[in-house]
Every structure is written in structure tokens, then in C-alpha cells.
Image (spheres, helix red, strand yellow):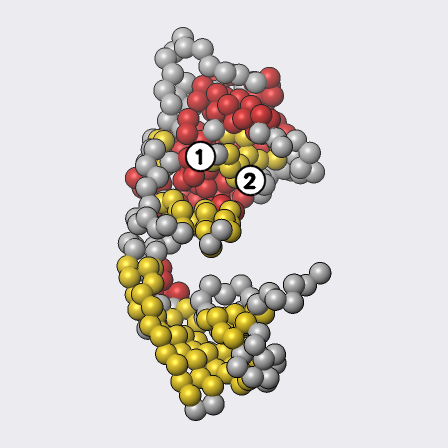
Amino acid sequence: EVDPSAPVVIGDRDGLLGIKFVAPKKDTQIKVTITCDDVMEESQFSGKLSEKGKEYHIYPKIKYRFTKLAEVTQATPVSMTFRLQIGNDVDEQTATVMLRPIHDCPFLVQEGELVLNTSFTFAAYVNEQHPFLDKLLREALDIGIVESFSGYQQGESEVIRQVYAIWDALVTRDVRYSSITATSVKAQTVASQHVRLIEESLNNSQANCVDGSVLLASALRKIGIEPFLVLVPGHCYVGFYVDEKQENMLAIETTMLGDAYDEDEEYDAMDLLEESVDEEERYDESWPSFSSAIVAGTTSLEEHGE
């Protein structure tokens, strides 16, 4: 049932920038213009507000300058002008808006008493088309755990081997867990976390729980294995389907990347892993951490199943 007192949203229903306006009369003809040369071309919406006294939320389709947005590396204030025209009458207001870099991922947004969980936006950093992945996969093949990356074509054991090959390549690159998650600016209405892009994680050899999960998920999607990000309070790790029908899944605790084990030190094991990878291919530098990470991640996945 539609609430008759609810505002009417017009224009770009997924828009973030717009105005609120109460129509002074029936069939009010309006034009809304938003300008901010730093990040967009002039963006407009023209239309008719049919109901007198009704509140309208009007969102023009923003013509972003995406190249400019990609160049932003730290939070920067920008001036944004909102213009409302009714006939020959023009009302104009300017607001200062904080422009965040692409590294800042908003996972919680508060609008008055409404709190929106936007943590799904972490998935936007998964990028299987990133050119760095070709180099990583080539390095994984050179190690020799697998002869090729074939997704689900050769069964569950080969899926495990492919995932281990990528994990081993990351260990060989000395990618390690880093707990740094700070964002570039704090705000009262938006909670966000800094996420390293793929090339940063590989070049700097460090990744926090989200960085490592995004990196591994990107590599798995690249080779045709379907991953997913797992979010539990205060933490993130990556899971993947072991079979093409997506009936069986495992998870990996990516914060264990780079964990070192002494030669005689015990580590957590799982029968499926031991059966999938021959003993001579379980390298001391990577196998204990891989096996333990699978056990830890899958155990957490089962505990948080609901």
C-alpha cells in the first residue's frame, strides 16, 4: 500500500544528488540543474510536478567526469551548485560536498534514524579484468602445481589445486596480512573503510582482510571459479563454490596469508585438501597456511551460516 504522504521521487531513481521541493501549484513546470566542474558536466532535469502541495525529490542524471573522479587520491571538499527554475524565477544554492577517493568504501550510511547497510559495495572492488591478474596467474602456472586453469571442468580436486596454486603464488610474492583499515576522512553519517586496489596489494605485498579477499576473489573469477565475500561483524574473508552446481562451498581466512610455520609445527588439516593435492606439491612455505586458512574460513562460514 502506497503512503499518500510519502514524497515522490522523479528523475534518476538511483541518483545521489538532487533537491527536495514542494509543488506550489498543480502542474508546476520545473528545471533542476546541478553543476560542479571538478567532477561533472552540467546536469539537468526538466519536468512537471502534477500535485499541488506534494513533496518531490528530484534527481537529475549526473554526467560524471569519470577520469577526474579516478584521479582523486584523498578526500577533497568541492563546491556544488543546485539551481531550481520555475518559469522565469530561479533559486540557487551552493553546498560544500566532501569528495572521497575510490579507495574509500562506504559500508554504512545513516539518514536520520534510518541506517542503511551498504557493505555489498565491497564487491565492487572485485575486478577479474585487472591486467595484474594475468601476471599473477602466469607466475602460478610456472610454479607447476597445475598445468592450466580450467575452472570446474576437471572436478572438485582440480578446483582445490587451482585455488592452492594462486595462494602459493601470493605467498611467493610475499603478500602478507596488514591490519591497516583506516579511511581518509571520518564522517558522522557515513562509515567507510580504505580498500587497496589490486595493483597496490601486489606491489606493496600487504593486504588487510578486505584487500586480500577482493584480490583472491578477483583471481578466482578470472579462472572461472565462482567466489563470494563473507562479511561477519568487523571482518571479511572469501568463500568459493567447489562445484559448478554451487552445492558445496569452502571459505579461506585471507588474513593468514604469509603466516609462517616451523617445519615440525602442526597445522589444521582437512581430508578434502589432503586428497586433492599430492604431498610432494604441498610446499612448506604455503601449504600449512593454506590448509589452516581453509579450515578457519570454512569453520567460520558454518558458524555464521544463518
Relative to 62, residue 167 above or below: above
Residue found at x 28% / y 54%: 74
The residue positioned farthest toward the top in the image shown: 264
Residue type indicated by callout 1 = Gly
Q: How many marks overall?
A: 2
- Classify the position of the N terminus by image quarter: bottom right
Q: Position of residue 219 (x, y in %)?
A: 48, 41
State the mark number for residue 208.
none
Asked whether the viewer can see residue 63, the reply is: yes
- Classify the position of the C terminus by image quarter: top right
State the mark number for residue 234.
1
Q: Secondary structure at mark 2?
A: strand
Residue type indicated by callout 2 = Phe
Residue found at x 50% / y 29%: 252
Residue found at x 53% / y 22%: 295
Which residue matches tag 2? 228
Compare residues 4 and 204 and report the one nearer the observer. Answer: 4
The quarter holding residue 33 reads bottom left
Whether pointer 1 and pointer 2 mark residues with C-beta atoms closer than 8 Å, the reply is no
Q: Secondary structure at mark 1?
A: loop
Residue found at x 57% / y 74%: 54
What is the CA distance from the residue labelled 1 to the residue labelled 2? 17 Å
Q: Position of residue 179 (x, y in %)?
A: 34, 33
Q: Is residue 238 left or right of residue 132?
A: right
Relative to 275, residue 17 above or below: below
Asked whether the viewer can see residue 294, the reply is: no
